Amino acid sequence: MPLLEISRLNKHFGGLHVTNSVDLALEAGEIHCLIGPNGAGKSTLFRLILGEYQPGSGHIFFAGENVTPLKSFARIHRGLSVKFQVPGVFKGLSVRQNLEIAAQRLHHGAELDGEIDRLLDFLGLADAQAQLAGNLSHGQKQWLEIGMAVSLKPRLLLLDEPTAGMSPEETHATGAMVQRLNAEGMTVLAIEHDMAFVRQVAQRVTVLHLGQVFAQGSIDQIVADERVAAIYLGQAHA
Amino acid sequence: MDIASLVFSSLYQFGDAFAFLVLSACGLAVIFGMMGVINLAHGEFIMCGAYVTVASAHAGLPLPLAIAAGTIVSALVGVLVELVVIRHLYERPLDTIVATWGLSLIATQGTLIALGSSMQGVGTPFGSFQVGNYSYSVYRLVLFASALAVLGGLYALFNWTRFGVIARATIQVPQMAAALGVDTRLIYSLTFACGAGLAGLAGGLYAPTMTLVPTMGATFIMEAFVTVVVGGADVFLGTAPAGAVLAVVKSAMTSWQGQLFGQIGLLVAVIFVIRILPKGLSGFLLRERT
Amino acid sequence: MNSLLRILGHLEGPQTVGRGPLFWALFAVALVAACAYPAFSDGYTVGNTVYFFTWVFIALSLCLIWGYGGSLSFGQTAFFGIAGYGYGILTINYGSAYGFTLVAMLLAIAVAALFALLLGYFMFFGRISGVFLGIVTLAVTLMLERFMAQTAGPEWHVGTARLNGFNGMSGMPPITIPWPGGSIVLFADIGLYYFVLGLLVLVYLGLRILMNSAFGNVVVAIRENPERAEMLGYDVRKYQLITFVIGAALAGTSGVLYTAWGQYITPSSMGMTAAALPLIWVAVGGRSDLTSTLVGTLTVLLVFQALTIYGSQYALVCMGLLLVLTVLLAPNGLVLGLMRLLARLSPSRRTGGV
């Protein structure tokens, strides 16, 4: 049974079909990358999976359960977690408090402090723990938010452009981080434009185009697919 | 009472409520819709318009000119307020509410100190007419016509004039408008003045129907609030239909249980509307349209 | 025992300014001074001080909802009024024997909280926020004022309690504590002073613990970024509603104490001016910190009363001016700014996170 199964998902704003009968199945344990030109409907698909948007029709199953009618927070309780495209850290609070807010739902007391310390080490943010999250560099904010998402111990981690605005070194470090999480058993679905990152981590790739699943396969299959190259023509970051 | 006079009576009540809601709210709605700012001193701009109107009328100006004077003075005060306070708070819309509340307090108490606890009004003009067994005020019909005229005028202003088109562009994409050489500060300033002037107009129009007291703004502000909350951010798709819907509620409740229940009915309607349509009628209508 | 220590540990934390031995030493000095104060003063002045204290609860409620929660509630006076009238109606009908005034106090606060639950359900589950929340709550309190103001006629009564329209309700008994050998009636002087002071200290410390706990973490997280908070698995609406209800109970506490203090309550306590005053205290003090709100409220009230000697209209103009200037020049509040400055200078500050 797939961990996440999306069936015939439709969402339209006015006459514009942002996702058009999307089918997607994610196996437990895989790192799956979602690519596609701007406006392909990738972020909308994330919002549908998270329950921020309600689909016009279609269903989302998570671990065998139909989660389509559930509110966002309830889906998080089922084992979903997300890092947004624009870092959604609590800017006015300290780095440590950001992690505490994320981790306190599962951990309490002294164990919570230990968990936060572990996360700070994992993210390489231990020295910055007293800083306000709003004062971090862009890359550090991305990591902090990944850390917050990870602290929920999700079964499926959604990453919306985790390496946007990062240097090649930071991108590679992020890739390694994602692989470590995956090795611990976390399934990952990532929207990514950076092909180096996709190449580094993706076990399977889905190409979304005009709200529809356009192609699916291993990274080598996708790169070799001339139709995929065609839809990227004119897109600078192909 | 026969059917015809009953129908007329209901229509009259509706028109009266509609005029009050729309005239109270449109100044607030223009500022909120265009700038995302709630002006809590809105009631005091109404008060200002009313006081200037009555003072001008006492000084011998004919009523229409006196109302125009009230409108203009309110608009000018609006320019001043925008310049001194509002301009510095565009990044913090919630703080704008708090600051304008402070202004409201200053204006109310300042008027009380300067002009005393009440001002001699001017009588309601035009007298009354008879339908069936009841007599009705002609001036109330004038108010209804004025409300329609204000809505029409605003529609023309924002759709057909250069200012209106530039203002709407500025509101939607401020950076782009600025890049195209539009003085966005001037646009915000004029929009605020327009809202303040509309408040002054409402005050001027209603001045002949009420006693003037420094706290009279509070009489209008609740109706203005509920209309804007129900209407949402768009004057034409929001304020006008909200005024119509709420006028039905208010006039029905008023004729059933009296003035107070009309107001309670308004508030209850609002609380239900926000549960169902958080973005107000205009949000709902806009979503249906696209 | 361990969990008790853990709870007390929340007396200090990231959500409250003031930590370490120096702060608590100052707190102890202030508390001792407050306890000793009636011995060096007369009944009238002590009664006046109680009047100040009664307002602190509504200020703290606004601090909680607005400063910590980020929701603008301009209608705290609605809960103040509901609880005040509630106390009046209950005690006028059932008297003060057998400690009933204390029961009435709790019931009145509960009614205010229930009203907040209902109103808050519609607002927060309708997901309105920001400016709309402010104007809906303000409209509610103005509506209540209008409603109570027209209850002058004899037909407006609950049991034997006449509502009395604009003149308000009066003649309710003060808070009375049953005691073997004769009840203690807390008139508006020393007796009520210690009662309110005790309540104030409890509420202040209780709120410190609450805001530094896991619950408080979520409340400030929602203020900072509600979408992120939801995506960490928190039901944002529920937390907002709970905060709103706690705030309403605090505002109601003010209402009851004020009514018991002066033995009267009028509709204007829910009006536009009455609603503006707590906003001024909290904004000037520093809305995002309990201690700043407490100190700010008492200071502004003191200044306000001093100004009233020259005429309350002038005092209100000054208050309006103070609010505008605070928002423009010191948006975080004057007391909070000052306390942050002191904390920076103080050597006992810890640099760590917790």
Image: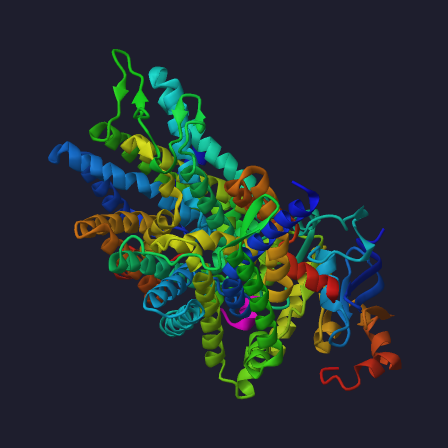
Q: In this view, does C244 lie above or below A94?
A: above
Q: Can residue A140 be found in the magenta stretch?
A: yes
Nearest the eye: C246 or A182: C246
Measured from the top left, where is residue B107 in percent x and y?
33, 60
The picture places residue A176, in percent across and down from the top left corner, at 66, 68
Residue sitting nearer the eye, B14 or C113: B14
Quarter residue A88 falls in: bottom right
The residue lying furthest to the top in this view is C181
Q: Is residue C212 visible?
A: no
Query: The C terminus of chain A appears in which quarter of the rendering?
Result: bottom right
Asked whether, in this view, residue C321 is left or right of residue C130, the answer is left
**A193 relative position to B212: left or right:** right
The answer to whether B181 appears left or right of A57 in the picture is left
x, y percent for residue B169: 59, 79
Look at the image and give the residue range highlighted in magenta.
A136-142
Q: Is the magenta stretch mostly helix, strand or loop?
A: helix
Tell me where residue C43 appears, x and y as whole percent: 16, 32
In this picture the colour scheme is rainbow
Q: In the displayed structure, does residue B170 sit left or right of residue A233?
A: left
Whether the magenta-drawn stretch holds residue C266 is answered as no
Task: Write the residue at 63% across / 79% down.
Answer: A168
Depth check: give the residue in front, A192 or B178: B178
Say which quarter of the image contains residue B230: bottom right
| Relative vertical location of residue A172 with respect to residue C270 in this rendering, above or below | below
User: Is residue A64 visible to us here?
Assistant: yes
Q: Residue at horizontal 21%, vertical 42%? A: C29
From this view, report whether residue A206 is shown above or below residue C241.
below
